[in-house]
Image (cartoon, rainbow, N blue to C red):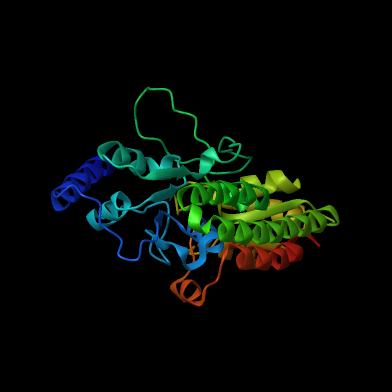
Amino acid sequence: MKRFLFICLLICAAVSVFASGKKAVKADGKPAVVTTIFPAYDFAREIAGDNVNLTMLLPPGAESHSFEPSPRDIITIQNSDIFIYVGGESDAWVDRILDSMDTNMITIRLMDAVDVVEEEIVEGMQEEEEDGGEEEAETEYDEHVWTSPRNAELIVRKIADTLESLDAANAAEYEKNTVAYIEKLRKLDGEFKDLVDGAKRKTIVFGDRFPFRYFADAYGLDYYAAFPGCSTETDCSPATIAFLIDKVRDEKIPVVFHIELSNENIADAIAEETGAKKSLLHAVHNITKRDFDSGTGYYDLMTQNLVYLRNALY
């Protein structure tokens, strides 16, 4: 409820600031593309290059699940030609904002570009505590659709088709860039498939949230983790930690993973107790300011994941 009231106040503030009601004129004539988080930003950058004005709302280094838009962010969205967001519970604020706007912008919801799966609670995983009430909980779908390179290809194609339709003058360049990038994604997909197919174990352990459901399904991996992918919990129960420690010991798992921008406390505890190595597996929710400024992208980070995953499976 507090978050809902906060968003309502933001919308009112943005409407007040934007009282003139007219969309800002872009002096350079380039389409304005706005994304909520990094994967969509990077995909749009790969497709469009310098032919669009591209903005990411989530600051580099920030936690994506707790992001709250500012009044300026809402105005940026309203001024966009294409607005790209993930969908799902973490983006509940988006629907409320879009419902309040009178605009001709095109929206792309990443979860609409792929076949989504329900968020899964596996053995040993700590479930997030629900607020009180007797209403039946709505089905929650896993939002991390981009973690599978196969899904990334579908998302890239959706963004490309939208850009080509909007900006016909640059459509040929968009298509050329898209074909080249999809070729890289398919190569990445083949490398992950070969890696897992040839591995001596098929189980990974996360002392963290697990945003890799689509990735695990794509390559036939089993997993154990402290929390589901969209959990906002950071403190883990002793029972959950004990379960993960036993799993690492029993199956002789050599690596315990954490995700980017994590405090790594749970992974540290499991690694210390079991002797397993602690390692990053990057889910590409967001990247550091340093990586952002250097131009690091989804393909770079997923290529690094090939090395980290090999260490865990071989």
Residue 63, position as x, y percentages in the image: 42, 59
Quadrant showing the N terminus = top left
Residue 169 left/right relative to 200: left
Query: What residue sits 66% from the left and 49% below the top?
Result: 215
* Of residues 209 and 52, the one drawn nearer to the viewer in this rendering: 52
Q: Nearer the viewer, residue 189 or 27?
A: 27
99 and 139: which is toward the camera: 99
On screen, residue 21 versus residue 92, left or right, reads: left
Q: State how many labels appear.
A: 0
Q: Position of residue 87 (x, y in %)?
A: 45, 42
Image coords of residue 195 (percent x, y): 80, 59
Q: Is residue 117 visible?
A: yes
Residue at left offset 67%, top offset 49%: 150
Q: Quadrant of residue 101?
A: top left
113 relative to 203, above or below: above
Q: Is residue 243 visible to us here?
A: no
Residue 145, placed above or below residue 26: above
Residue 57 lies, in percent from the top left, at: 37, 58
* Above or below 97: residue 148: below
Q: Quadrant of residue 2?
A: top left
Q: Is residue 298 left or right of residue 21?
A: right
Q: Residue at x 55, y 38 (%)?
A: 119
* Residue 19 vertical position relative to residue 308 in the rendered view, above or below: above
Quadrant in the picture for the C terminus: bottom right
Q: Residue furthest front?
A: 169
| Closer-to-camera residue (236/221) | 221
